[in-house]
């Protein structure tokens, strides 16, 4: 039975290239055999007496043979094809979640500003009586959407809305008042890359304050 070492020795001494080594794809087990044959040949070189020129020639021949099964043509293309997927996830995550954080921050500020406006002590200019939050002019909703113009701080498709305030203080002027604002976040990329991601993503913020 002709072993792999014998084939390698034939290549070295007879300058033959068996068809066996012309295959470009070899499995890991075969490559392990080639490495073992490499070690055997090195021992053979040490055991026998060769001139420096012959030893160098054998070394380069063996090196060319071992490279036949280890070619890496196309590896760069494969790596390049795999890189865009995680790269898109990273870039899309930065853009989408950055905007999500910004929109949530705007909603939080808007709800706090609406609650502060509703609970602030205000009086009727004609009678001097205190105005309840439900009778304020402009209303809490108009104050946030028109006076403060919070919708302009959000994307055009955010659908900014102010829920009618509630709580004991909203109609009586004594007690807590709840102000809630909502919006929608439409994903740029993540909805196409992450299955099951809600699009649009509902956002909301609620603030409660006690009337002065």
Image (spheres, rainbow, N blue to C red):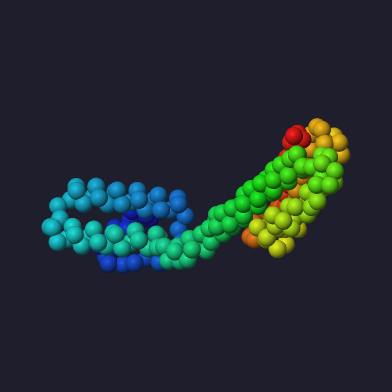
- Viewer-proximal residue, 16 or 170? 170
Is residue 62 found left or right of 127 in the rendered image?
Answer: left
Q: How many marks?
A: 0
Q: Quadrant location of the C terminus?
A: top right
Q: Pick out the residue farthest to the left.
A: 51
Q: Give the x, y percent position of residue 124.
A: 82, 45
Question: What residue is drawn where x is 70% and y is 63%?
Answer: 156
Quarter of the image for residue 128 reads: top right
Q: Give the x, y percent position of residue 38.
A: 31, 52
In the image, is residue 73 above or below residue 32?
A: below
Is residue 165 found left or right of 186 in the rendered image?
Answer: right
- Viewer-proximal residue, 76 or 130? 130
Q: Give the x, y percent position of residue 39.
A: 29, 48
Question: What residue is drawn where x is 28% and y is 59%?
Answer: 62
User: Can residue 41 be seen from the camera position used here?
Assistant: yes
User: Can residue 205 be seen from the camera position used here?
Assistant: no
Question: What residue is drawn where x is 75% and y is 48%?
Answer: 181
Is residue 19 found left or right of 121 in the rendered image?
Answer: left
Q: Pick out the residue farthest to the top.
A: 175
In the image, is residue 40 above or below residue 71?
A: above
Is residue 36 found left or right of 184 in the rendered image?
Answer: left
Quarter of the image for residue 132 reads: top right
Q: Give the x, y percent position of residue 130.
A: 82, 39
């Amino acid at each position: 039975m002709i072993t792999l070492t014998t084939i390698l020795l034939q290549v070295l001494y007879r300058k033959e290239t068996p068809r066996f080594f012309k295959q470009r794809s070899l499995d890991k087990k075969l490559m392990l055999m080639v490495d073992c044959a490499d070690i055997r040949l090195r021992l053979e070189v040490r055991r026998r007496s060769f001139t420096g020129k012959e030893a160098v020639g054998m070394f380069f021949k063996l090196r060319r043979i071992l490279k036949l099964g280890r070619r890496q043509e196309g590896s760069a293309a494969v790596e390049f094809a795999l890189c865009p997927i995680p790269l898109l996830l990273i870039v899309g995550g930065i853009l989408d979640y950055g905007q999500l954080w910004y929109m949530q921050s705007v909603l939080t500020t808007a709800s706090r500003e609406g609650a502060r406006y509703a609970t602030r002590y205000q009086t009727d200019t004609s009678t001097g009586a205190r105005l309840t939050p439900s009778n304020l002019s402009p209303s809490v909703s108009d104050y946030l959407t028109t006076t403060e113009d919070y919708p302009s701080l959000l994307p055009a498709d955010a659908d900014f809305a102010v829920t009618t305030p509630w709580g004991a203080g909203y109609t009586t002027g004594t007690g807590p008042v709840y102000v809630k604002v909502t919006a929608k976040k439409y994903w740029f990329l993540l909805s196409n890359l992450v299955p099951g991601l809600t699009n649009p993503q509902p956002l909301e913020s609620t603030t409660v304050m006690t009337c002065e």
